[in-house]
Image: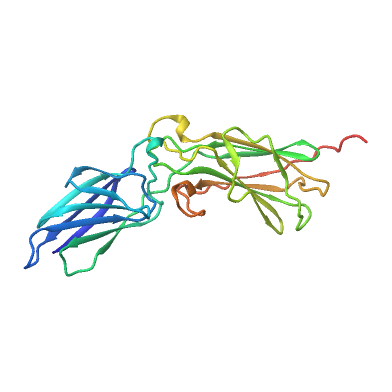
């Protein structure tokens, strides 16, 4: 048996349609057709329309969907998780992914079929600010840190990476973090990354996943960020410096790599104004 014209395409952020034609060989007119997904893409798969299949989760984080295979055309629609955070719909990577189709009995090898990407999820327009709150401390804030109201599949923790230059090159003393806004935590995987010109600090939301599919504004993200950064006597901050704020997501809760993310990166930056006068005495 062989499979011809196999296609797989998203018909909604959480729905995948699969179709093709099974051709019988001279020695067989029925068998099985099995689709296997990439690992760690979905938290759950249900067959909701078309050909009925049996879904089996595999140990490596992938799913297999097996159907009775008879000659002729077929189509089936898969629901890729529930539309709420409890379902942890992991969605797509924001890039081309693949399914593997294997029809048995067959003289051909399993076929790998690409699934065209959907556009990346988007967050609202991010606005940042950085102000001196004392001679030795700066407060950095950002708003708009939530998914847009358009239908968005679940993404991981929202991540904010802040690059702060140092007045002294190769300064070994990172800033001290305090008064972090509710709903945020210092990224436990990579708290401070030092480079010659300063440091990159990363923060992530305490909520592991966000989605706009529920219609619940609270599920779209935390919405605002604020942190106080205290410098030391080596004059970490300096007026006129740019503080770069990168906003993306962290998919490690889904078993993806640390650098995988599902939103287009936004990179607003803010400029420190005039430094206040030192305390008297």
Name which residue lies at 74% across and 46% down: 240
Q: Is residue 52 above or below residue 184?
A: below
- Residue farthest bottom in this picture: 107
In the rendered image, the quadrant that contains the N terminus is bottom left
Q: Quadrant of the C terminus?
A: top right
Residue 127: where, in percent of width, then height?
58, 38
Residue 44 occupies quadrant:
top left
Left or right of residue 61: residue 210 = right
Q: Which color scheme does this rendered protein use?
A: rainbow
Camera-nearest residue between 256 and 246: 256
**Which is nearer the eye, 63 or 210?**
63
Of the pair 63 and 97, the residue shown nearer to us: 63
Q: Is residue 24 above or below residue 273?
A: below
Question: Total of numbered circles in the picture?
Answer: 0
Q: Residue furthest right?
A: 281
Seen in the image, is 280 located left or right of residue 266? Answer: right
Say whether residue 4 is left or right of residue 166: left
Judge left or right: residue 136 versus residue 108. right
Residue at 77%, 52% in the rendered image: 167
Q: Position of residue 220 (x, y in %)?
A: 46, 35
Q: Residue 159, image x and y in percent?
A: 55, 44
Residue 28 lies, in percent from the top left, at: 8, 64
Residue at coordinates 79% horizontally, 54% vertically from top-left?
A: 168
């Amino acid at each position: 048996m062989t499979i011809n014209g196999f296609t797989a395409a998203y018909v909604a952020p959480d729905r995948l349609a699969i179709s093709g034609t099974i051709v019988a060989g001279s020695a067989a007119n029925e068998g099985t057709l099995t689709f296997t997904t990439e690992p760690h893409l979905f938290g759950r798969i249900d067959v909701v329309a078309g050909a009925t299949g049996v879904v089996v989760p595999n140990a490596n984080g992938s799913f297999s969907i097996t159907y009775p295979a008879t000659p002729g055309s077929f189509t089936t629609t898969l629901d890729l998780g529930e539309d709420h955070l409890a379902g942890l719909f992991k969605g797509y990577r924001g890039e081309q992914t693949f399914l593997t189709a294997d029809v048995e009995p067959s003289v051909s090898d399993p076929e790998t079929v690409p699934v065209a990407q959907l556009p990346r999820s988007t967050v609202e327009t991010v606005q940042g600010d950085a102000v001196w709150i004392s001679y030795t401390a700066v407060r950095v804030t950002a708003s708009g840190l939530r998914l847009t109201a358009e239908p968005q599949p679940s993404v991981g923790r929202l991540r904010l990476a802040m690059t702060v230059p140092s007045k002294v090159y190769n300064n070994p003393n990172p800033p001290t973090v305090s008064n972090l806004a509710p709903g945020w935590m210092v990224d436990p995987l990579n708290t401070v990354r030092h480079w010659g010109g300063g440091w990159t600090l990363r923060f992530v939301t305490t909520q592991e996943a966000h989605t706009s599919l529920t219609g619940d504004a609270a599920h779209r993200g935390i919405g605002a960020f604020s942190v106080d950064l205290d410098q030391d006597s080596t004059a970490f901050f300096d007026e006129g410096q740019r503080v770069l704020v990168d906003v993306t997501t962290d998919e490690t809760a889904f078993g993806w790599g640390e650098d995988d993310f599902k939103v287009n990166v936004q990179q607003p930056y803010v400029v420190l104004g005039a430094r206040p006068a030192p305390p008297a005495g």
